[in-house]
Image: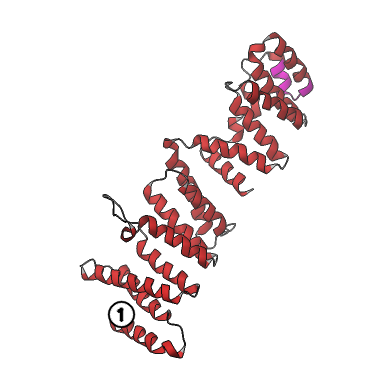
């Protein structure tokens, strides 16, 4: 159901709704070349009369059989005979693969499946349509649509918003859709990072740890062996490294978390020493030093080490 709703959103956002792709007014809008008696029957809901005339046209003008089949599918569907409708529409696909009506026949089938509650069958057709739309010029547009809906599902509004509901699992799926596209680099950066944040929000510490590792493997220059020319670091490197340590700490991986925080603190302090002074970096270095002390736990055998780490934090970040 979620995939179906998502695909409908994407098609709608591109002004390519299933109804539009199936023809204006569910097929009756493309009737300019159809004989007046058939057009009148369709427009006035005389489905059986229309079907009888369409059968005759199949004999008189067999070169337009694909169109007669499409209209027959519409008529059967409107009359509540969905099996007959699907049979007519499938015939267009199977016997008239080059017909200009194939796309409309497919979407009419999807609409029938959706109306019958056969969501998996409908989704398969809609997903195929989205894949077709993923031409290079559509990539950024589709990615932006996915990103907008993902951000909405994962962002707490600054003020009470009636009807707004956080759904981090849905947001995760939508961000993943961005990564399936040839999205702009900044958008890919954000999607990768926010997928990990969604796992933090749901308390899935192991998955969060894995997702931060994936982000850093792709966008942290210190992990690129060799570092390729023109490589651009991710915009969330420092926070991703800190959150990786937090995830490890939450998983009880104290020793690994300690290494993560120690490396992060040293790299941040080196950056500060080099003149790259920024309040955010200094705050992050302080967080790393403080959380490093937390990795020692509370046992008496490590109390001295923890105390020394806390003291270093206080010495380096007195305010």
Q: Is residue 10 above or below residue 240?
A: above
**Residue 315 in the image, given as x and y percentages of width and height:** 29, 84
**Residue 210 in the image, given as x and y percentages of width and height:** 47, 62
**Residue 217 in the image, given as x and y percentages of width and height:** 39, 58
Q: Is residue 110 left or right of residue 171?
A: right
Looking at this view, name the residue that lies furthest to the front.
225
Q: In this view, does 259 lie above or below 225?
A: below
Circle 1 is placed at which residue position? 317
Quadrant showing the C terminus: bottom left
Looking at this view, name the residue that lies furthest to the bottom.
300
Residue numbers of the magenta segment: 38-48
Query: Can residue 42 be found in the magenta stretch?
Result: yes
Residue pictured at 73% horizontal, 23% vertical: 44
Secondary structure under the numbered disc 1 in the rendered image = loop
Report the predominant secondary structure element of the magenta stretch.
helix
Q: Is residue 294 left or right of residue 314?
A: right
Q: Which of 251 and 288 is in front in this view?
A: 251
Residue 313 in view (yes/no): yes
Mark 1 residue crowding within 10 angstroms, few (<14) / some (14–19) / many (20+)? some
Q: Which of 41 and 211 is in front in this view?
A: 211
Q: Which of 192 and 54 is in front in this view?
A: 192
**Residue 135 in the image, given as x and y percentages of width and height:** 45, 35
């Amino acid at each position: 159901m979620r995939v179906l709703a998502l695909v409908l959103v994407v098609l709608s956002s591109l002004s390519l709704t299933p109804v539009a792709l199936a023809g204006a007014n569910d097929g009756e809008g493309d009737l300019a070349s159809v004989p007046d008696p058939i057009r009148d029957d369709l427009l006035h809901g005389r489905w059986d009369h229309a079907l009888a005339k369409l059968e005759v046209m199949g004999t008189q003008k067999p070169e337009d059989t694909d169109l007669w089949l499409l209209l027959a599918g519409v008529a059967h569907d409107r009359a509540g005979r969905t099996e007959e409708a699907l049979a007519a529409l499938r015939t267009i696909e199977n016997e008239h693969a080059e017909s200009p009506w194939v796309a409309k026949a497919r979407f009419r089938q999807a609409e029938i499946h959706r109306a019958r509650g056969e969501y998996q069958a409908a989704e398969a057709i809609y997903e195929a349509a989205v894949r077709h739309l993923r031409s290079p010029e559509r990539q950024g547009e589709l990615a932006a649509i996915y990103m907008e809906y993902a951000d909405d599902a994962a962002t707490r509004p600054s003020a009470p918003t009636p009807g707004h509901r956080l759904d981090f699992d849905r947001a995760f799926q939508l961000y993943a859709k961005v990564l399936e596209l040839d999205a702009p680099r900044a958008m890919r950066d954000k999607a990768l990072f926010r997928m990990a944040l969604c796992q933090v929000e749901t308390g899935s510490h192991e998955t969060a740890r894995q997702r931060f590792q994936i982000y850093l493997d792709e966008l942290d220059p210190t992990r690129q062996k060799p570092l390729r020319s023109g490589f651009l670091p991710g915009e969330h490197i420092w926070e991703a490294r800190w959150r990786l340590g937090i995830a490890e700490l939450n998983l009880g991986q104290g020793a690994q978390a300690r290494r993560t925080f120690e490396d992060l603190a040293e790299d941040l302090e080196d950056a500060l020493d080099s003149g790259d002074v920024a309040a955010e970096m200094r705050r992050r270095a302080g967080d790393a030093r403080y959380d490093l002390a937390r990795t020692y736990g509370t046992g008496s055998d490590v109390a001295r080490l923890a105390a020394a780490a806390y003291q270093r934090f206080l010495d380096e970040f007195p305010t």
